[in-house]
Image (cartoon, coloured by chain):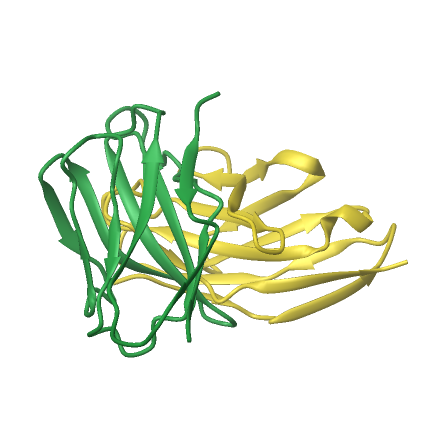
Chain colours: A yellow, B green
Amino acid sequence: AQSVTQLDSHVSVSEGTPVLLRCNYSSSYSPSLFWYVQHPNKGLQLLLKYTSAATLVKGINGFEAEFKKSETSFHLTKPSAHMSDAAEYFCVVSGESGGGADGLTFGKGTHLIIQP
Amino acid sequence: DGGITQSPKYLFRKEGQNVTLSCEQNLNHDAMYWYRQDPGQGLRLIYYSQIVNDFQKGDIAEGYSVSREKKESFPLTVTSAQKNPTAFYLCASLPLGGVTGNEQFFGPGTRLTVL
């Protein structure tokens, strides 16, 4: 079975400063990993995904994440926060099939707050 | 435009009533999923279907039922047996085959409140 731990339930940064959202995972196979973003009362949008290719993954809106197998981590970063980044962020791991075919396992989310 | 639609956006029901949430996709995706979202809990998988007329239970299937009569549609019924149905419900779809790691696409969600 797989699991995901998002290490911070809330993160607050000032606009223009770097963002770091931390995620650790546990899996008995080589999973695919995803970061999704959710704005209030909306569905989820994919930010980026790791599928065993390059360990540094670039996504939309300037976000990127680095897969570190030795640390079982997949932290999300952005060099400079923007007010529009304020949202809930979910770290997600695939099922044993590798993709999301048998469902995804979600972390509990990190609420990102951007201070003006 | 291709996408996933969920209706209604807000739904209210009285205790003891069954209610059905709609999910339709025109992406020609094979697999469809229902998740439940509670504050601070992330998303939890209720049911999923990889092919028409077949579906599997997820982690929290008790009190829910689904059908998959058409590829495009995957309605979720919240039955009176679900003890705490108030939540945000999200539907997703996924194309099967091809490259490993295909991401799921999500609908806008339905917020169900039991009065």
- Residue closest to the far left: B53
Residue A75 locus on image (x, y percent): 58, 55
Which is nearer the eye, A97 or B42?
A: B42
| Image quadrant occupied by the C terminus of chain A | bottom right
Q: Is residue B59 left or right of residue A90?
A: left
* Residue A81 seen in this snapshot: no
- Residue closest to the far top: B1
Residue A93 locus on image (x, y percent): 39, 53
Q: Please report the residue visible at 58 percent of the width from the left and 49 percent of the height from the top.
A: A37
Q: Is residue B39 above or below residue A49?
A: below
Q: Quadrant of residue B88?
A: bottom left
* Residue A73 seen in this snapshot: yes
| Image quadrant occupied by the N terminus of chain A | bottom left
Residue B9 locus on image (x, y percent): 48, 50
Q: Quadrant of residue B79?
A: bottom left
Which is nearer the eye, B88 or B95?
A: B88
Q: Is residue A38 left or right of residue B27?
A: right
Q: Is residue A28 above or below residue B82?
A: above
Q: Is residue A71 above or below residue B63?
A: above
